[in-house]
Amino acid sequence: MPVLALLSAVFVIGFEQLVQWKYGATGLVGLLLLTVGIKAKSPAVSSAGAVVLALLMAGPAL
């Protein structure tokens, strides 16, 4: 079980670094809001994070 926890932690940290590298600090804030909202079961916070990430991804298309 500790190996699975270690692998998931490495994956999460790697994904956060990828988002920050590609989308900057705003992407990291959006991902943080989405994660905190899901863990706290708060639809408002998770929706705000999802909107931030969606705007960042759709920005070049607009």
Image (cartoon, rainbow, N blue to C red):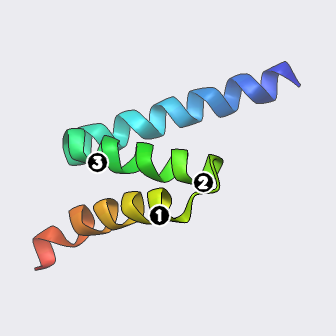
Q: In this image, 31 relative to 29: left or right?
A: right
Residue 44's tag is 1
- Secondary structure state at the residue bearing disc 3: helix
- Local secondary structure at mark 1: helix
Provide residue 40's location: percent of width, then percent of height.
Answer: 62, 48
Q: Quadrant of the N terminus?
A: top right
Q: Position of residue 28 (x, y in %)?
A: 33, 41
Q: Residue at x 58, y 27 (%)?
A: 10
Q: Say what amino acid the circle numbered 1 marks.
A: Ala
Residue lying furthest right in this view?
1
Position above or below: 41 against 21 = below
Q: Going from the N terminus, do you reach mark 1 or mark 3 first?
A: 3
Mark 1 vs mark 3: give the one in front.
1
- Left or right relative to 39: residue 17: left
Q: Earlier in the sequence, mark 2 or mark 3?
A: 3
- Counting from the top left corner in percent of width and height, residue 51 is at 34, 67
Which of labels 2 and 1 is toward the front?
A: 1
- Give the residue at mark 2: 38
